[in-house]
Image (spheres, helix red, strand yellow):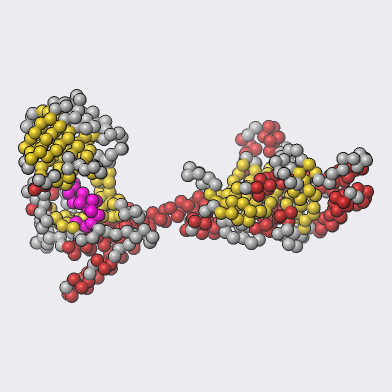
């Protein structure tokens, strides 16, 4: 005894579902909103089928309104699992809640405003009227959507027809090449089904909560206006289930639904996504009265051509999806990276994978932000902060850096990842000097309204860090993690105590070569770091004043660190007389004088900072 059925669902004169099912059938409404599609058929792993025939809020239909099982060749067993709602039959009788009743086929149930007809599939189309291609449509995951050309065996086509077939294929390629968006592809696909495959109507159907909706349609001009009835659920079900192009002749169906009146042939092919799932169906019909005076039946060759066209749609949609994703990534990456690097990462996002890399990290802080905010409130200083951070950010991008984050009034940037930059330390220092060069103009712009000077402090460190996407699935954030970052942050904090706008570590200094002027600032203990760090101040090599100061200051620092306080004081006293505005020299002189006055009892060449 067969356990295959034909199930049709009508609402008034509209055929909502016409599908082949297997095993026991459960009819009911959606479990909850959008949990299941209306008129969706679900085949359960253990056997049987669930058919959703009402929305979740249609309380006149139970979630499990009816269970139907075969008990004999021509009989069904109908169960009403509801505890309160009777189950109505078309003849006016009812099956009470929790009751079971046998019935002869075909059976017609009334659930809410819909009629459900269930019959044996002995009335389904015969093998000669519903056919499918031998193999399912194929997707190549590594390359996007692909098509095995060998399946369209040119040797099976009569020689006189070969030029026509090749012309059709060229026409398909031209049609799809002109499409640029998802809507374009759908329209071109429906149009090509009519003009190239020579169907009377072509549609692209996509899933909707109510079943299927038309995303694009095209009709032979000689058939306009053409009624657009519901598509054949039987064909759609077969195409989605087997993922094969299928075709059949509705005139041979004993119980042909009203939606197929005037239709002589139906053909459909699946449109697949990258995972091989059906996302749309290319659907076409031939009418019983053709403008040629005859109605040629759909052939296997027609189905194969339609499948080629559907695969072209799949490839085009995959390309559109990939381009859309690349644009989204590009927009996201351009917030952090240079435009060139953003384009590179959009096409090669694997470069963002976490890895250990030697990098240079820069922290830049706006001075006096808290004091100015307390004086002016928040709104106005934020405009000033935004302007300063903008100028600093441009310097980072101008020198190939990555904008990692803004932390209040502070900027975090890095060099050396995701792309290799052998000169990452030099790039960071060039960017920092450009930031300092921009400060006078920023100060001129804001001093009057702020009533205070605009100044920044910059700390730089070089070392190995783990770099990659350190965010979450909710927020992308590319940046570094590790001690290298922590040290850079602490170095930035030393700027205010050393009264220097740009401070770097020994690790960065060793990678600069002779391009920059640097002077030592000594070794410093900072909060949360076990070992003292050796610090330097950086100047532009074109600054003649800085060149003279750096050499004399380094000589004094060497004397100070060796314990020669008198020698250090002599050099620093002369240096501060010549350059009274040189704060690091004045600061070192004050330390040396303090130790000498204390009788050297507390002498320590390492500066200890107990605050960040």
Residue 111 to residue 549: above or below: above
The residues colored magenta run: 229-246
Residue 235 is covered by the magenta coloring: yes
Q: Position of residue 17 (x, y in %)?
A: 18, 43
Tell me where residue 68 appears, x and y as whole percent. 15, 37
Which residue is located at x 76 percent, y 55 percent? Answer: 539
- The quarter of the picture where residue 27 lies is top left
Q: Quadrant of the N terminus?
A: top left
Residue 388 can be seen, yes or no = no
Q: Can residue 486 be seen in the rendering of this structure? A: yes
- The quadrant of the image that shows the C terminus is top right
Give the residue at x 71% y 35%: 371
In the image shown, does 360 or 99 lie closer to the viewer? 99
In this view of the protein, which residue sits in the foreground, 222 or 78?
Answer: 78
Q: Residue drawn at (21%, 55%), measured in percent from left and top?
A: 268
Q: Residue at x 84, y 48 (%)?
A: 585
């Amino acid at each position: 005894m067969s356990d295959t059925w034909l199930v049709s669902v009508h609402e008034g004169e509209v055929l909502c579902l016409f599908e082949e099912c297997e095993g026991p059938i459960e009819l009911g409404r959606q479990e909850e909103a959008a949990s299941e599609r209306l008129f969706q058929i679900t085949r359960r792993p253990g056997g049987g089928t669930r058919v959703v025939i009402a929305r979740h809020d249609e309380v006149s239909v139970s979630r499990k309104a009816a269970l139907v099982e075969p008990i004999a060749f021509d009989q069904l067993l109908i169960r009403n699992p509801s505890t309160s709602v009777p189950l109505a039959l078309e003849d006016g009788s009812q099956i009470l809640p929790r009751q079971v009743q046998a019935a002869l086929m075909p059976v017609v149930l009334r659930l809410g405003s819909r009629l459900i007809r269930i019959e044996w599939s002995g009335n389904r189309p015969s093998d000669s009227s519903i056919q499918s291609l031998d193999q399912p449509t194929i997707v190549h995951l590594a390359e996007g959507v692909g098509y095995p050309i060998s399946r369209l065996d040119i040797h099976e086509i009569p020689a006189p027809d070969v030029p026509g077939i090749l012309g059709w294929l060229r026409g398909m390629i031209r049609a799809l090449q002109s499409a640029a968006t998802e809507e374009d592809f759908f329209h071109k696909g429906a149009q090509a089904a009519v003009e190239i495959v020579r169907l009377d109507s072509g549609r692209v159907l996509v899933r909707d909560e109510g079943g299927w909706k038309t995303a694009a349609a095209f009709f032979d001009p000689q058939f306009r206006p053409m009624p657009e009835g519901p598509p054949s659920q039987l064909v759609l079900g077969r195409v989605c289930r087997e993922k094969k192009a299928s075709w059949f002749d509705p005139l041979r169906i004993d119980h042909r639904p009203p939606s197929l009146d005037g239709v002589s042939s139906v053909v459909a092919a699946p449109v697949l996504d990258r995972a091989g799932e059906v996302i749309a169906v290319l659907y076409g019909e031939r009418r019983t009265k053709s403008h040629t005076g005859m109605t040629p039946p759909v052939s296997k060759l027609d189905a194969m051509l339609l499948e080629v066209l559907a695969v072209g749609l799949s490839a085009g949609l995959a390309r559109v999806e990939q381009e859309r994703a690349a644009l989204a990534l590009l927009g996201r990456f351009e917030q952090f990276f240079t435009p060139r690097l953003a384009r590179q990462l959009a096409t090669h996002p694997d470069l963002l994978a976490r890895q250990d890399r030697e990098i240079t990290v820069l922290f830049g802080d706006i001075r006096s932000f808290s004091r100015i905010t307390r004086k002016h409130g928040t709104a106005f200083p934020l405009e000033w902060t935004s302007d300063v951070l903008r100028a600093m950010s441009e310097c980072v991008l101008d020198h190939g850096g990555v904008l990692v984050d803004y932390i209040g009034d502070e900027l975090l940037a890095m060099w050396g990842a995701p792309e290799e930059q052998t000169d990452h330390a030099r790039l960071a220092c060039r960017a920092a000097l450009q930031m300092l060069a921009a400060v006078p103009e920023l100060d001129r712009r804001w001093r009057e309204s702020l009533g205070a000077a605009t100044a920044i402090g910059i700390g730089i460190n070089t070392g190995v860090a783990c770099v990659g996407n350190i965010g979450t699935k909710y927020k992308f954030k590319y940046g570094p993690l590790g001690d290298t970052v922590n040290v850079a942050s602490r170095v930035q904090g030393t700027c205010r105590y050393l009264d220097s706008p740009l401070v770097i570590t020994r690790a960065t200094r060793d990678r600069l070569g002779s391009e920059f002027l640097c002077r030592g600032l000594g070794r410093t203990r900072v909060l949360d770091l076990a070992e003292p760090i050796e610090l330097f101040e950086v100047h532009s090599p074109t600054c003649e004043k800085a060149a003279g100061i750096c050499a004399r200051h380094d000589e004094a620092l060497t004397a100070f660190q060796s314990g020669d306080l008198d020698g250090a004081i002599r050099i620093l006293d002369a240096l501060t007389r010549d350059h009274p505005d040189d704060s690091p020299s004045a600061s070192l002189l004050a330390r040396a004088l303090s130790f000498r006055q204390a009788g050297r009892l507390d002498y320590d060449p390492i500066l200890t900072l107990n605050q960040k």
